[in-house]
Image (spheres, rainbow, N blue to C red):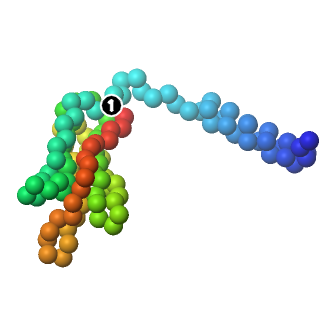
Amino acid sequence: MFSKASRQSLRLAVVAVVAMAATTVAADPAAAAPTGCSYGPVYWGSNLVGTDGTCSGGTGQHRAVLWCLKDGGKLVYGPWKNPGQFSYQDCGSNFWGTPYLASYYSYAIRN
């Protein structure tokens, strides 16, 4: 069914996966995702152009997420920040300083 080389490769792959699983360190139970997060829109006139916000507690990080309409639409991300720090993201602007528009904002968190 399988050649000797295929069986040996499969065995090595299984051994590697088991070895990686055995050496994986469990996450610190004291680590927690950010809490008390509050993000809001940033407007230029009546147009959504960015988002900013912060989280008040926890030990992880958070960042702004924004869907920009320029070039057919794309997600852009603000920098990862610790609780108590603000993360901001906008869609940029053209040569004349007019901001590019967005249609959706949110935030992401990580432990």
Query: Relative to residue 44, is residue 74 drawn left or right?
Result: right
Residue at (52%, 31%) from the top-left corner?
Answer: 25
Residue at (79%, 42%) from the top-left corner?
Answer: 10
Q: Nearer the viewer, residue 81 or 42?
A: 42
* Mark 1, residue position: 33
Residue at (7%, 58%) from the top-left corner?
Answer: 45
Query: Relative to residue 76, is residue 48 drawn left or right?
Result: left
On the question of residue 90 being in view, the answer is no
Q: Quadrant of the C terminus?
A: top left
Label 1 Cα neighbours within 10 Å, binned few <14 / some 14-19 / many ≥20: some
Looking at the image, residue 57 lies above or below residue 104? above
Toward the left, the furthest residue is: 45
Residue 51: x percent and y percent?
A: 19, 49
Kind of element beneath mark 1:
loop
Q: Nearer the viewer, residue 101 or 50?
A: 101
Q: Amino acid at mark 1?
A: Ala
Query: Relative to residue 63, is residue 3 drawn left or right?
Result: right
